[in-house]
């Protein structure tokens, strides 16, 4: 009996085609080798970065990455928005500084005093030194020239002070004693004018003895001039610098004034009972100091 009869019915033939060549197994080993090669190539391309033990290595951000950040973008927008305002503020500040420093403004009484003192006081001190030098050389013409320069600079100083319209400063601290700046300046300038008048008489002298005839007047006028100078300086400028303990004295020729002899009863020259003033002193109306009639 055939196999088909034994099984009953013969099974229909299958339509599947039998594979003539079986599929090769999947090659996994070569793939691992490729991955290893790629890692080696990447290691060669990547820059070698030293690894620190215990601390993670942080990569530095490049400039392009910083520019693309939101902080940089917002900062740029802020600068563009407020940069004109900052520029205007800076220009305004420098313009104000230049105007305050160099622009025209009304000087204060303190500034006027300092400007005039800086201009005239050194010149007058130099004149006093010239007088001292000429007296040491016993040169009458040099003495008269130095006295003339002293007179001119003293008057120039007083004229410069008199050109200022007001010496009162509302922001200044009142001076002790109640003396105002105007009163102090009036006393100081009056002393300077008085000293200038005395020097006018000195310039008429023909001998050193004639100059000595005004010695006491010159000493008193210079003492008042120096005292009132320091008082006015403290009131106007608010300076705490006090006057020196010893004020400079007026330079005079050495010796003692000898009065000129007056005619006696017989008409011949003779010594009077009391010292008489020199002709220059009598002409000026300035009394001569009471001194000894014996020349030194």
Image (spheres, grey):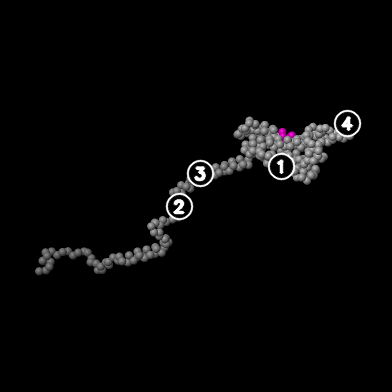
Residue at 71% across / 35% down in the picture? 224
Q: In the image, 115: left or right of 62?
A: right
Mark 1, Cα crowd under 10 Å, few <14 / some 14-19 / many 20+, is: few
Mark 2–mark 3 Cα distance, whole angstroms, equals: 22 Å
Magenta part of the protein: which range? 190-194
Q: Earlier in the sequence, mark 2 or mark 4?
A: 2
Position of residue 171 relative to residue 18, above or below, is: above
Could you tell me if residue 159 is visible in this image? no
Q: Secondary structure at mark 4?
A: loop
Q: Earlier in the sequence, mark 4 or mark 1?
A: 1
Residue 9 locus on image (x, y percent): 13, 64
Q: Earlier in the sequence, mark 2 or mark 3?
A: 2
Badge 2 is on which residue? Answer: 66
Position of residue 5 relative to residue 259, above or below, is: below
Q: Main secondary structure of the magenta part?
A: helix
Corner quadrant of residue 163? top right
Position of residue 193 relative to residue 21, above or below, is: above
Q: Which mark is residue 173?
A: none
Q: Secondary structure at mark 2?
A: helix
Q: Earlier in the sequence, mark 3 or mark 1?
A: 3
Judged by depth in the image, the label closer to the viewer, 3 or 1, is 1
Corner quadrant of residue 282? top right
Mark 1–mark 2 Cα distance, whole angstroms, equals: 71 Å
Badge 3 is on which residue? Answer: 82
| Labelled pair 3, 1 in contact (Cβ < 8 Å) | no
Residue 293 locus on image (x, y percent): 81, 36
Q: Earlier in the sequence, mark 1 or mark 2?
A: 2
Mark 2, Cα crowd under 10 Å, few <14 / some 14-19 / many 20+, is: few
Badge 1 is on which residue? Answer: 125
Residue 18 locus on image (x, y percent): 23, 66
């Amino acid at each position: 009996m055939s196999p088909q009869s034994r099984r009953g019915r013969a099974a229909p033939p299958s339509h599947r085609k039998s594979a003539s060549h079986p599929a090769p197994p999947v090659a996994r080993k070569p793939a691992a080798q490729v991955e290893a090669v790629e890692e080696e190539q990447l290691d060669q391309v990547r820059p070698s970065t030293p690894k620190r033990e215990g601390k993670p290595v942080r990569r530095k951000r490049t400039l392009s990455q910083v520019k693309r950040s939101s902080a940089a973008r917002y900062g740029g927008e802020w600068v563009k928005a407020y940069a004109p305002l900052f520029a205007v503020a800076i220009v305004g500040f420098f313009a104000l500084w230049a105007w305050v420093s160099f622009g025209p403004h009304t000087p204060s009484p303190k500034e006027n005093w300092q400007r005039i003192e800086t201009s005239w006081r050194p010149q007058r001190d130099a004149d006093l030194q010239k007088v001292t030098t000429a007296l040491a050389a016993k040169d009458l013409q040099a003495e008269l020239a130095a006295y003339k320069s002293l007179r001119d600079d003293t008057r120039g100083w007083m004229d410069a002070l008199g050109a200022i319209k007001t010496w009162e400063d509302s922001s200044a601290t009142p001076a002790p004693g109640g003396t105002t700046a105007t009163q102090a300046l009036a006393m100081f300038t009056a002393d300077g004018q008085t000293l200038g008048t005395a020097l006018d008489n000195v310039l008429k002298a023909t001998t050193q003895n004639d100059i000595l005839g005004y010695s006491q007047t010159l000493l008193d006028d210079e003492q008042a001039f120096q005292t009132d100078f320091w008082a006015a300086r403290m009131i106007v400028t608010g300076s705490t610098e006090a006057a020196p303990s010893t004020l400079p004295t007026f330079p005079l020729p050495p010796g003692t004034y000898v009065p000129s002899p007056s005619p006696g009863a017989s008409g011949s020259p003779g010594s009077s009972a009391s010292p008489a003033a020199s002709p220059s002193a009598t002409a000026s109306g300035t009394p001569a100091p009471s001194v000894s009639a014996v020349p030194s």
